[in-house]
């Protein structure tokens, strides 16, 4: 009986020790598990925090992208605005420049017109200043070794009635010398003086057009100063070029298509002679022929 009690006690002690050891082991495992759980919870917390950071980072990146797009849009708008403003300014400058160029061209035209008028007026003054001392009243031919002029009439006479005639003709001058001749003065002398009349492409100084000066076209004008009026009374008509005129060597100029109306009176004949005088060269030449009409 006592032996059975001892056996039961040993078993109980053994079992109690076993369970104690088992309990200790379980407690260790529990502690390890709790520690592991704490680690996992910390990792989970950190993971959750990392996820939040990533989401926040993604949101910030999206915001940055949106801001960059807005900045790009604003830059483009600003660039377009500046470009439009610059183009508008350039257009304004171009219009202003065009206006200024037009004004400059108009001013240049006015200046050229004024220069032309001044030249014409100077020529008029120059033509009007000729006097008997400048030209001389004699009809003698003055010869110069270096200057030679061949001048002649080419004309025809038209009878309009028994007492009315019209001479149509041209007067040609050819430089046959070795130097140019400048600014010829033409003298047409009528005998008798009652028939002194010369019409055609010749104008008075007042009628000459100072706005259409052309060096390619000869514009013949009558001398109409006091001396020329006195010369006309004695049967002479003096004609000059409105502008400076040069006759180069071997060149010909002409006073073309003139008309001389003649109304017969009592004279038996009408004679028209011509002389050409060059003031600068001090040279005078007589025409090789003359117009002569016998009634």
Image: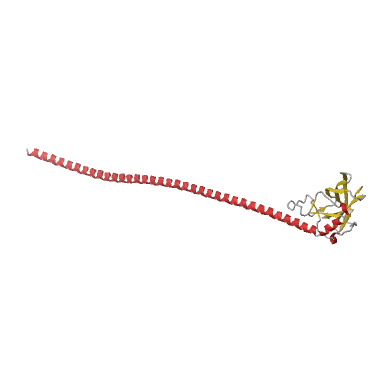
Residue 14, horizontal then vertical, whole percent = 15, 41
Residue at position x 77%, y 57% in the image: 124
Q: Is residue 274 visible?
A: no
Relative side of 151 to 120, left or right: right
Relative side of 176 to 81, left or right: right
- The structure's colour scheme is secondary structure
**Count of numbered tags:** 0
Q: Is residue 66 visible?
A: yes
Relative side of 207 to 84, left or right: right
Residue lying farthest to the front in this orientation: 266
Q: Tell which of 44 and 162 is nearer to you.
A: 162
Q: Tell which of 116 and 205 is nearer to you.
A: 205
Residue 20, horizontal then vertical, whole percent = 17, 43
Residue 159, horizontal then vertical, whole percent = 88, 44
- The quadrant the N terminus occupies is top left
Residue 54, horizontal then vertical, whole percent = 37, 45
Q: Tell which of 70 and 59 is nearer to you.
A: 70
Residue at position x 47%, y 48% in the image: 74
Residue at position x 25%, y 43% in the image: 33
Residue lying farthest to the bottom in this orientation: 133
């Amino acid at each position: 009986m006592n032996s059975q009690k001892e056996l039961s006690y040993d078993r109980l002690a053994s079992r109690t020790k076993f369970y104690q050891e088992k309990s200790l082991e379980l407690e260790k495992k529990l502690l390890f598990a709790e520690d592991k759980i704490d680690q996992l919870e910390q990792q989970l917390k950190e993971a959750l925090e990392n996820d939040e950071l990533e989401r926040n980072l993604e949101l910030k990146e999206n915001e940055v992208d949106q801001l960059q797009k807005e900045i790009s849009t604003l830059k483009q708008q600003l660039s377009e605005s500046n470009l439009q403003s610059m183009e508008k300014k350039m257009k304004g400058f171009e219009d202003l420049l065009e206006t200024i160029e037009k004004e400059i061209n108009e001013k240049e035209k006015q200046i050229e017109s004024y220069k032309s008028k001044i030249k014409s007026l100077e020529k008029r003054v120059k033509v009007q200043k000729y006097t008997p001392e400048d030209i001389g009243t004699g009809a003698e031919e003055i010869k110069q070794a270096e200057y030679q002029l061949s001048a002649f009439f080419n004309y025809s006479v038209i009878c309009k009635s028994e007492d009315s005639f019209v001479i149509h003709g041209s007067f040609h001058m050819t430089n046959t010398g070795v130097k140019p001749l400048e600014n010829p003065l033409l003298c047409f002398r009528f005998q008798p003086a009652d028939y002194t009349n010369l019409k055609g492409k010749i104008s008075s100084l007042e009628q000459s057009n100072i706005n259409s000066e052309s060096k390619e076209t000869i514009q013949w004008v009558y001398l109409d100063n006091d001396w020329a009026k006195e010369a006309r009374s004695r049967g002479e008509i003096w004609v000059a070029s409105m502008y400076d005129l040069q006759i180069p060597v071997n060149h010909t100029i002409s006073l073309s298509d003139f008309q001389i109306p003649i109304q017969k009176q009592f004279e038996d004949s009408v004679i028209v002679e011509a002389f050409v005088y060059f003031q600068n060269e001090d040279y005078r030449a007589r025409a090789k022929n003359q117009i002569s009409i016998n009634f």
